Image (tube, grey):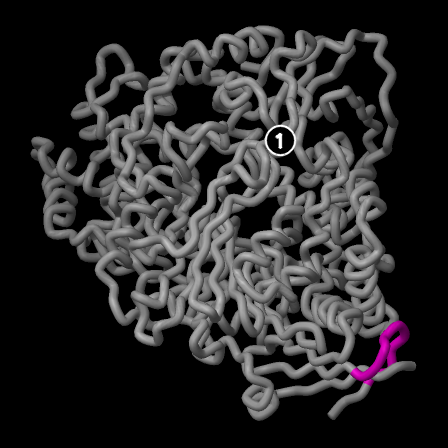
Amino acid sequence: MPERRVDGIDGEISIHRDEWGIPHVQARTVHDAFFGQGYVQAEDRLGQLEYDRRRARGTWAEVAGRTALTFDIFSRRCGLAEAASREVAALDADARDVLVAFTAGVNAVLALDAPLPPDLALAGVTPEPWVPADCAAVFLVRHVVFANWQKKLWRGRLAAALGADAVARLEAVDPREVPLIVPPPEVLVASSADAHDLDAVLTAMAELAEPAAGSNAWALHGSRTASGLPLVAGDPHRALEVPGVYAQAHLACTEFDAVGLSFVGVPGFAHFGHTERVAWCVTNANGDYQDLYVEDLGPDVAPARRVQVDVRDGTPVEIECFETERGPVVFGDPARGSVVVLRSTALVEPSSGLSVLAPMLTARNVDELDEVMRAWVDPVNNLVSADVDGNVAYRTVGRIPVRDAANAWGPVPAGSGEHDWHGNVSYDDLPRRRNPDDGLVITANQRIVGDEYPHYLGLDYARPDRAQRLRSRLTPLRDATVADMAAVHRDRYALAADVWVPRLVALDVTDAWEQAGIDALTAWDRCMDPDAVGAAVYAVTRDATCRLLAHHPELASVRAPLVDEPPGTFQPLELRLWVLSTGLLAADDATLLWDDQDWNSVLAGALADAIGVLRTILGDDPADWQWGGLHHAAPRHPLTVLHPEWHDRLDPPLVAMGGEWDTVMCAAHPAGHGFGVTSTSVARYVFDLADWDASAWIVPLGASGDATSPHFADQQQAWSVGDLVPMRYSWAGIEAAATATTVLRRA
């Protein structure tokens, strides 16, 4: 049993690694448990820690070159590193000690002077020691682009291009029913939008001179399960990355025994985990906590700071960062006209969100957990929880400011005070449920409450597909088991196909290849399985429809990002249209059609285009037009974008995937720009509150971020088909199954 002597621990720490390389950390004190978590994360994900820290500090271009420059500038303008420092300084001593312990664990690995992992070695980067503010910074950088400011910017630009009436119709056009998360339990038809709400947006957009991720989570009450105690399950949807954003881990000390998915660079299990008594998980609530303001600061305004952004193999870039009373200037130059200011809850004042990390692990029931989450700030989440007493609960958590309805739609004018914030929606007023009569809590980024709810929470909810499908799968279940939950994870039924397929098969076609496509659609069960021909015809035709709609001349101004808008935050027009197109088709709405078009002519052209794509890529035999032949999960390490010659040394193998954007087994492709998987389930889990050792989970690759490790991609194949691996919890079983154990002792 290997031993290592390290500084900064109270006593002995044992680290057992199971057959998947997942670390199980045993310690006596809370400090040592979080020290151990930092230690194993540095062992497994050192390159990823450095990547996220540099993106938060705006120094990734020093490693990756000009491809990273735009995001570095955005991070510097937002002042993420400065905000992280303020956040840590504002935490109380107990909360700060958690970050200190985690940071000490990371630095203990750096002090070993061991060989660097391949990504850092190839890039020639030796990480500096970590500081507690780095934990806050990596969480900030992941979530400053996670909310809805991009959608507001897009909607403002769309309103400027098409007018307020068109945008209001597009937002309200999907007539399908949405199962609400919180009572009334009946489904809701989305309310119509008021175009007058965009008046202020149009005013603001007129001042600008422009160039021409989801998730599922659910809980079943014990009245629906075989054991009589709850089951909690779900899967977060984010960008597919190398390595993955979450790391599986297990931490135990005298105060708690917790297992979960840790956010790399952040201690604890802020999003998904369980202790001996309570399990919890989240989905994005699509809460509106970020606003964009258009301001004219005048050409003589002084910058808050001037910084130099260094660029590998390039010339350093000098930038000026401006601050207003509403927040940082993110786009534009005051010397050249109006600018765009971002106001976000975590940037307005120091966030208290990370103060919940340790108290979450000592909560004894769902009510205590609910009280702990009062301090959560952003992102605004749907929190689903259950406890061993048999309770299941839902709560919207996070800070949502109170302000004018126009702020919801897009950039608004600054200066008059009409669009300022006026405090936050009270935590006690945020939606919640406890032990619902039907025994189900279902969250899939859908609308949370109906029009009777007195506060504005958000506008940009997911389309109803996944929520509807989850309700239809879960409602009939009785005596449910972990295996039943895993089967729901694997559900690939495309509800949107119920809108598209009848319209497509009704087309009159004379081409034999197109008729083969129609025949495949007619025979298709509407499941996006990798071997399904109908799935490929449907997806490629829908993709072609989006490309055709994107050529509308009035949409030319929204095809490219704003100057200085990071490519990673800009969604191509075709991708926006993928989301909108089903509702437009269902309502037979011609808002985005040319004057001489109707939906039948658009669909006929798209089908012809799609058949050409399928024949070109997969051949002339329609039996070979299978979805998995196009739809691959082939994520790339951030460095192989700059150095494709490192592909074999840093990237995992590709795997064929089923699913699409709106299936429960989510696997989205970049509509209009290829069919590879870009956003998907970055973890899946089932917590069994009757038998923690029956719980299971999976991540897209593996525990390690080191491409030479046997645990770099050993979960990939199981993940691609929707299987799970054991979530080991009992220490006797962990020790018996451990493939490696390391003991840390005081130096």
Q: Residues within 10 Å of mark 1 (few under 14, many from 20)?
A: some
Q: Position of residue 733 (x, y in %)?
A: 54, 88
Provide the major secondary structure of the magenta segment.
loop
On the question of residue 691 being in view, the answer is yes
Instruction: Say left or right for 551 vs 336.
Output: left
Instruction: Say left or right for 246 vs 310.
Output: left
- Relative to 84, residue 172 above or below: above
Answer with the quarter of the image where residue 447 lies: top left
Instruction: Pick the quarter of the image with the C terminus.
Output: bottom right
Instruction: Say left or right for 290 vs 7.
Output: left
User: What residue sits 61% from the left and 50% below the top?
Assistant: 373
Foreground of the two, 182 or 550? 182
- Relative to 585, residue 687 above or below: below
Q: Look at the numbered disc 1 and give the secondary structure of its residue.
A: loop
Answer with the quarter of the image where residue 542 lies: top left
User: What residue sits 26% from the left and 38% below the top?
Assistant: 541
Foreground of the two, 26 or 18? 26
Can residue 546 be found in the magenta stretch?
Answer: no
Q: Position of residue 473 (x, y in %)?
A: 26, 57
Q: Position of residue 597 (x, y in %)?
A: 22, 17
Q: Which residues are magenta?
A: 4-12
* Kind of residue sitting beneath label 1: Asn
For mark 1, what is the residue?
A: 424
